[in-house]
Image (cartoon, rainbow, N blue to C red):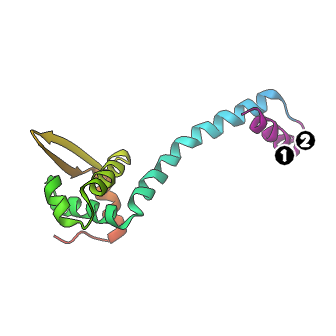
Amino acid sequence: MAQSADRLGRYLEDELGSCRDEDVQQRLEELESLGGGLQGLDVLSALANETRYRLVRALVAADGELCVCELNHLSDISESGLSHALSKLTDAGLVASRTDGRWKHYRATTRAVALVTVLDGTIDE
C-alpha cells in the first residue's frame, strides 16, 4: 500500500504542481469509495457464463421458486456444477434461496429480473 501511495503522490505532484500528504490521503479515500462500485463486475461475471445465465433466465421466467431438482433437469451439468453455479449467482445477488426440509428452492431477485429484462429486451411468458 505504501508503494501505491508513493506512486499516487508522484502522480498528484505532476498534476497539481505540488503534493501534500493530505492530498494523497484524500485521493486514496476517494478511490476507496469508488471500489464499492466494482460489485457490479461480480454480477456481470456471474451472467457471463452460459449455464448461469440460462439458470437465471429460467428463474425469472418462472416468476416464483424452482426446486433445485427442477433446475437440475433444465441444465446439462453435474449436481456439483449446478451447486457451484447457483452459489455464484447467490453471491452476486441474482438468486435467493430457502430450504424446505431436504429441498432447496431458488428464486430470482429483483436485480436479476431487471438485468435479464434489459439483456433480453423482454421476457417471454
Instruction: Examine the rendered structure and indicate whether residue 26 appears above or below residue 65.
Output: above
Question: In the rendered image, which quarter is residue 77 located in?
Answer: bottom left
Crowd tier of the residue under label 1, counting other residues whose Cα lies within 10 Å: few below 14, some 14–19, many 20 or above: few
Instruction: Examine the rendered structure and indicate whether residue 8 appears above or below residue 74.
Output: above
Q: Main secondary structure of the magenta part?
A: helix
Residue bearing the label numbered 2: 17
The three-letter amino acid code for the residue at tag 1 is Glu
The three-letter amino acid code for the residue at tag 2 is Gly
Question: In the rendered image, which quarter is residue 50 located in?
Answer: bottom left
Q: Nearer the viewer, residue 69 or 60?
A: 69
Give the x, y percent position of residue 47: 39, 60
Secondary element type, mark 2 = loop
In magenta, the rendered stretch is 1-18
Give the x, y percent position of residue 65: 15, 52
Residue bearing the label numbered 1: 15
Mark 1 and mark 2 residues within 8 Å of each other at the beta carbon:
yes
Secondary element type, mark 1 = helix
Viewed as shown, does residue 104 lie left or right of 118?
Answer: left
Instruction: Examine the rendered structure and indicate whether residue 34 appears above or below residue 58.
Output: above
Q: Nearer the viewer, residue 22 or 9?
A: 9
**Residue drawn where x is 9% and y is 38% of the image:** 101
